[in-house]
């Protein structure tokens, strides 16, 4: 069974790159996309993801502010703060707010995939040691089912799993 993901990032290019890169890995499925923390909480309630990949800096409601909203909306979802804010304080703040993991965007796709799989297996994830990187992944055809709150994106991004 695939790990169901909700991706929340206000940058359309980041969401597109995540769709393309994560779509190459077996066992991962993006079921929804959000442009801010408020949309992430709403979509978490609707789509019941296994893991929410949450950017820190977003308009309206930040990733940090969204953590309790997502916890309330989808108590079974794991939350990975996926950010370009590389600091120990940011990591501590995210974990204290209730995130299950923290990963810097510079860690790369393989580190992200490993973190998502660890979270789905109920493990805590923190910034990896830069000297060690996960390796190896089986590539397959990209997944094509997700949901987006970005109405400026191509019509494919509005497609919902099973629709």
Image (cartoon, rainbow, N blue to C red):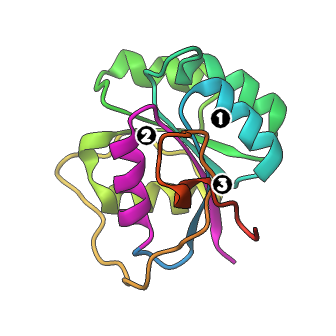
Q: What is the x, y in percent for residue 100?
A: 59, 38
Q: Mark 3 sits on what residue?
A: 122
Residue under the point 39% across and 53% down: 16
Q: Is residue 153 left or right of residue 98?
A: left
Give the total of numbered labels: 3
Classed neighbour count for the residue bearing mark 1: other residues with Cα under 10 Å, few (<14), some (14–19), many (≥20): many
Q: Is residue 86 left or right of residue 71?
A: left
Disc 1/disc 3 C-alpha distance (Å): 21 Å
Q: What is the x, y in percent for residue 44?
A: 74, 42
Q: What is the x, y in percent for residue 47?
A: 77, 52
Which of the two labelled residues, at mark 1 and mark 3, occupies the earlier sequence position? Answer: 1
Q: Is residue 129 left or right of residue 163?
A: left
Look at discs 2 and 1 and give the one toward the viewer: 1
Which of the two labelled residues, at mark 2 and mark 1, occupies the earlier sequence position? Answer: 1
Specify the segment rendered in magenta: 1-23
Classed neighbour count for the residue bearing mark 2: other residues with Cα under 10 Å, few (<14), some (14–19), many (≥20): some
Secondary element under disc 1, as helix, strand or loop, is: helix
The N terminus: image quadrant:
bottom right
Secondary element under disc 2, as helix, strand or loop, is: loop
Residue 86 lies in what quarter of the image?
Answer: top left
Q: What is the x, y in percent for residue 75?
A: 81, 39
Instruction: Check the image and report above or below for 43 versus 3.
Output: above
Q: Mark 1 sits on what residue?
A: 40
Given contact means CB atoms under 8 Å apart, are the residues at marks 1 and 3 in contact? no
Q: Mark 2 sits on what residue?
A: 126
Given contact means CB atoms under 8 Å apart, are the residues at marks 2 and 3 in contact? no
Residue 113 lies in what quarter of the image?
Answer: bottom left
Residue under the point 64% across and 53% down: 147
The C terminus: image quadrant:
bottom right
Disc 2/disc 3 C-alpha distance (Å): 13 Å
Residue under the point 40% across and 41% down: 12
């Amino acid at each position: 069974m695939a790990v169901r993901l909700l991706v929340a990032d206000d940058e359309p290019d980041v969401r597109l790159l995540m769709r393309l890169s994560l779509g190459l890995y077996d066992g991962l499925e993006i079921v929804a996309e959000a442009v801010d923390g408020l949309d992430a909480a709403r979509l978490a309630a609707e789509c019941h993801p296994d893991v929410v990949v949450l950017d820190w800096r977003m308009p309206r409601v930040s990733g940090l502010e969204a953590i309790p909203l997502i916890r309330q909306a989808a108590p079974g979802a794991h939350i990975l703060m996926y950010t370009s804010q590389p600091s120990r304080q940011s990591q501590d703040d995210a974990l204290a707010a209730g995130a299950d993991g923290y990963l810097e965007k510079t860690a790369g796709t393989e580190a992200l995939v490993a973190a998502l799989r660890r979270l789905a297996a109920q493990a805590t994830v923190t910034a990896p040691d830069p000297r060690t990187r996960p390796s190896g992944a089986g590539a397959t055809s990209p997944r094509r089912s997700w949901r987006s709150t970005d109405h400026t994106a191509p019509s494919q991004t509005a497609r919902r799993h099973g629709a």
